[in-house]
Amino acid sequence: MISFIGRRFSAMIFVLVSISILVFLIFFATPGVDPAARIAGRNADQQTLMQVRQSFELDKPLPIRYLSMMRHLFVDRDLTSYVNRGAKVIPQLSQAIPATFSLVIGAAVIWLLFGLIFGVLAASSKRKWLDPTISFLGIVGVSLPVFWLGEVVNLITQSKLHSSVFRWVPPLGYVGLSVDPWQWFLHLLFPWLTLAVLYAGIYVRVLRSEILVVMSEDFIKTERAKGASEKRILYKHAARMSLMTIVSLFGLDFGALVGGYALLTEVVFGIQGVGKLTFDSLQNFDLPVIMATVMYASFFVVFMNAVVDVLYAVLDPRVRRA
Amino acid sequence: MSIKESSEAIFSESPGKIALRTLRRDKRSIISLAILGFVISISLLAPVYAHFIAHTNPFNSSLDALAHVGGKSVPVLEASTTGLGLGVTPIGPTWNPSSYFLGADGQGRDVMARLLYGGRNTLLIGTSAAIICIVLALLIGVIAGYRKGWVDAILSRLLDVIWAFPVYLLAISLSVVLLTSGLTVGFIHLGPGSFALPILIIGVVYIPYVARPIRAQVLTLREREFVRAAVGSGAKDSTIIFREILPNIIPSILVFVPIIIALCMLTESALSFLSIGVQPPSASWGTIINDGLALLYTRPWVGIAPGLLIVLTAASLNLYGDAVRDALDPKTRSRGDS
């Protein structure tokens, strides 16, 4: 078990290092792309380009620049932005984290609640119309572009109806939990619902088909033969087995979202979170900020991946040897 | 016919034929294919609509054009009546197919015509990206699973890295870098406005989603008796791969195709919405939603219409994917028969 965790951990470090190199290469070594020209802006003359190259150390060899950036990011923790010279990157990132966490955790509660209830209902209900209806809603959920849904929600809550039904909906933006809990809740309610729709759709679909697969296994037949009630079979066996899949799926989705996958929701609702920060810095070609956010994001993804794998190994000894 | 449908005849059919017949009888596949056929044909007819019905060029801004509403001609851009009266508001939907059916966008262009042209690009990019993704994933998955050893180790680590790189961040990073200067590899140059860039970017980011399950499947197939028998009888690797392994992973590939197309389409729209996908003056459903953002509270249809088409298309693709999966895998087909 310990050697399994050890192997998993070293694989994690490998992936993180590779991603940092990949990001660096995308920005500095893509054929035909001159980062100095991007930083200097359009129509910059040769002299400006030279100055930019010097002051951003772009004239040094790639490996040295990479190592220096990593040292500033992880060891000295004083990496500064390319765009706002002197502004440190790490405080910018840590300021954006609470908004993203608030958005993702709230949405996760909603989508797990709906996903689990309707997934079990779709797989087990005796009412004939319920399964196709839920499955149809699930398909619509996974097919909705979240940025468009967000716009439509804004149109409904911020436009004509804002003076009547949705008078209580505050303007777009984010208010910290510690500043005003009630306003925090009101500001995030519709972003939560919007983000949760897609994932509720995914979880309903996955849980439903998982339960149906488990229900066709032999041990369920044995249970039936032993005379166990359908309710007991569903909750004690089928739903429980399927929960394994849901837990691992949730780990991965949560990691990705916390790392900035909620970018589109943040952009549409004007929430200054990690995703929005990454997107803004991508447009300014602010590589240090991008490097920090991408490392942060991939850390969560890789970490949750590893946690899920270890959990699996704890629950299922066969995995350890693989 | 009656003989063919007798139970003996069914038992003698190949699994593929049975699946195809199940699929043909599935209401979901009929409905979704009908919707997809409709969306594809109206998109293909975009030039016909623009030239012969709406008489407009949806790629040039036409700020002083006139729209025809109820026999009268009105300017497509009206001076704003709200606020300081400085800006202009484009005309809303006229619901008249020959003149600004869905209104105009901020540059006075016909939204309906752009919507149809945009559909072509969204469908083209989504489908091409999905094909690239699945072909590369198949290649990587089969090689990694079949060769095992260090080849598998390298390819799997590569997949791990792409997998852990959040899809949108990877796609956005690549787009931001490539869309200003294009990509030059050797003597091949892809210009900044080329659709090949979003197609490649979107195709690459989803490779692990398909390659990982394929690799796992090949790994188990490799240990099955019939593959071992082929190895033992001295068959060449290429023969084993094409005759024994590929036919057994085709069903899972078929299930992936519509789902990955839907996923790629949604990603294309998201990138275009963030203005790092399809570049102006070309349109895609995502760029039109972006155009509609500024007009959201005055002319909501500009943003709503392309989104509805995305949902309709993506939902049909997913529905068709469900039907294909159920036709190929009887386990998930339905409950109550156990």
Image (cartoon, grey):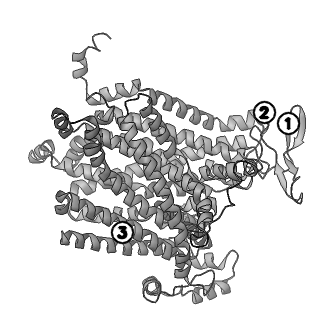
Is A176 situated above or below B309? Answer: below
Measured Cα–Cα span from mark 2 to mark 1: 8 Å
B116 relative position to A94: left or right: right
Residue in the foreground of this view, choosing between A133 and A93: A133
Name the quarter where the C terminus of chain B is drawn.
top left
Q: Residue at x 44, y 41 (%)?
A: B258
Q: Which residue is mark 1?
A: B68
Between label 2 and label 3, give the one nearer the viewer: 3
Chain letter behind tag 2: B
Q: Quadrant of the N terminus of chain B?
A: top left
* Front in this rendered view, residue B145 or B301: B301
How far is disc 1 from disc 3 in space, using C-alphas?
Answer: 60 Å
From the viewer's perspective, is residue B89 above or below residue A26?
above
Q: Does the CB distance between marks 2 and 1 fall below 8 Å?
A: yes
Residue underneath mark 2: B96
Which amino acid lies under the numbered mark 2 shown in the image of this protein? Asn
Badge 1: few (under 14), some or many (20 or more) residues near its Cα, within 10 Å?
A: some
Relative side of A176 to A128, left or right: right
Q: Is residue B204 visible?
A: yes
Q: Amino acid at mark 1?
A: His
What's the amino acid at mark 3?
A: Phe
Separation of marks 2 and 3 at Cα, in angstroms: 55 Å
Which type of secondary structure does the marked residue at label 3 adopt?
helix
| Residue B242, above or below B186 | above
- Disc number for residue A303: 3
